[in-house]
Every structure is written in C-alpha cells, then in structure tokens.
Amino acid sequence: MIDTIEHRIMLGDEQAFELLYRRYFVRLCAFANKFLNDPYSAEEVVQEIFLKLWENRATLRSDGSGKSLLFQGVHNKSLNLLAHQKVVNRYSEMIRTVYAQPEEFDVHDSLMAKELNLRIQTIVNDLAPECKKIFMMSRAEGKKHHEIAEELSISIKTVETQINRALKKFRLELSDYMVVLSTILFFNI
C-alpha cells in the first residue's frame, strides 16, 4: 500500500493534516474568493472544508485525490453560500423596503405596510438581545458579517448563525405576509 498523505490523515496523523492544510490553504482561499469576492468569507469556506475533511477522515480515500476533493468541496460550498446569500439578500430587501418606505404606497397598501411594519418591529424586539443587535447591525446599519464579528469580537460563523436565526423567525412569523410583500415590491419596482 502506498503511504499517501490522505492515508496518513485517515489514520489520524495530525502532522499530515497540517501539511495538507499548509500546502493548499492559500490556493483554496484564492479559489473561493474568485466566487465569493470576499476574502473573509472565502477563508471561512476553506476552514469549514478542512474541518469537514478532518471530521470525515475515516472515509477519505487514500488514492491521492485529496487535492481534488478539497477544491471540489470549496467550489460546492462557495456556490451554496452564494445561493443562500441571494435568498437572504432578497428577503432582507423585502423587509427593508416595507420597513423603511411605507409612505410610498397607496392608502390600502400603506395601511397594510404600517401593519406589517408594526409586526416587523415586534419580531425584532422579540429577538434575543445578541441576535437583535447583530441583525440590526447587519440590516439597519448595513455592516458586513466580518465587520460585525470584528466589532463584537465574535466569529463570523456566530454572526451568520444569529442572522439566520432572525431570518428564520421572520419567515415563520411573516409567512402570511409573503404574498403582500411580493405584491408591494412588484408594484414598487
């Protein structure tokens, strides 16, 4: 049997893993950044892929395919992150439009928008304090995830988790308003 770096990692060799990490980390970050155009997110993606590789090392093949596995994982994770971010951005834009500009609609739409505005304020106020702070920094102040993480001395992953929790609560609480939101946005464009 050939003693490949993948085989050594399968056996739990941390030095082999560190060697693989050092060998490909910078290239993988550059690769992810081509998709994400955000060095902080690219680094997070690469770190997640390496973590996943280590956690699943027992299923790793020892045929020298580690490099392609890493690049494929980073590619897939980057595309998934982009798709997720599109959904988050679209939903956030709908909330921001209704939340910030209810006076631009006709009387009926304005009343619905005011009712929705109150519901949104209630949801925001009901968020856990840390979640509320992070969500408002992101949505109201327009800060990027890495900026929030640096300012609050927390990880980017924590920021993403808190924002996702807030958006999940919005989706649950506002599901009956989605048709209204879509209609308002459609006619507001």
Image (cartoon, rainbow, N blue to C red):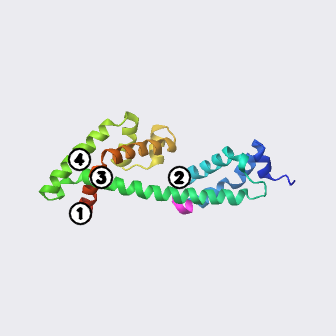
Name the amino acid, label 3.
Answer: Arg
Name the amino acid, label 4.
Answer: Asn
Marks 4/1: CA–CA distance: 16 Å
Q: Give yes or no for residue 35 being in the magenta stretch.
A: yes
Residue 90 numbered tag: none
Determine the secondary structure under disc 2. Answer: helix
Q: Position of residue 35 (x, y in %)?
A: 54, 62
Q: Tell which tag, 1 or 2, sits nearer the viewer.
A: 1
Marks 3/4: CA–CA distance: 10 Å
Q: Position of residue 61 (x, y in %)?
A: 75, 54
Determine the secondary structure under disc 3. Answer: helix
Q: Tell me which numbered mark, 3 or 4, is placed earlier along the sequence.
A: 3
Depth order, front residue of 76/178: 178
Prevailing secondary structure class for the magenta stretch in the rendered image: helix
Residue 117 numbered tag: 4
Q: Tell me which numbered mark, 1 or 3, is placed earlier along the sequence.
A: 3
Name the amino acid, label 2.
Answer: Ser
Q: Position of residue 39 (x, y in %)?
A: 54, 55
How many neighbours does mark 2 have within 10 angstroms: few (below 14), some (14-19), or many (20 or more)?
many
Residue stretch rendered in magenta on the structure: 33-40
The residue beneath circle 3 is 96
Above or below, comparing residue 61 to residue 135 in the picture: below
Residue at x-position 37% and y-position 50% = 142
Name the amino acid, label 1.
Answer: Asn
The residue beneath circle 2 is 41
Determine the secondary structure under disc 1. Answer: helix
Depth order, front residue of 29/64: 64
Q: Tell me which numbered mark, 4 or 1, is placed earlier along the sequence.
A: 4
How many neighbours does mark 4 have within 10 angstroms: few (below 14), some (14-19), or many (20 or more)?
many
Determine the secondary structure under disc 4. Answer: helix
Q: Tell which tag, 3 or 4, sits nearer the viewer.
A: 4
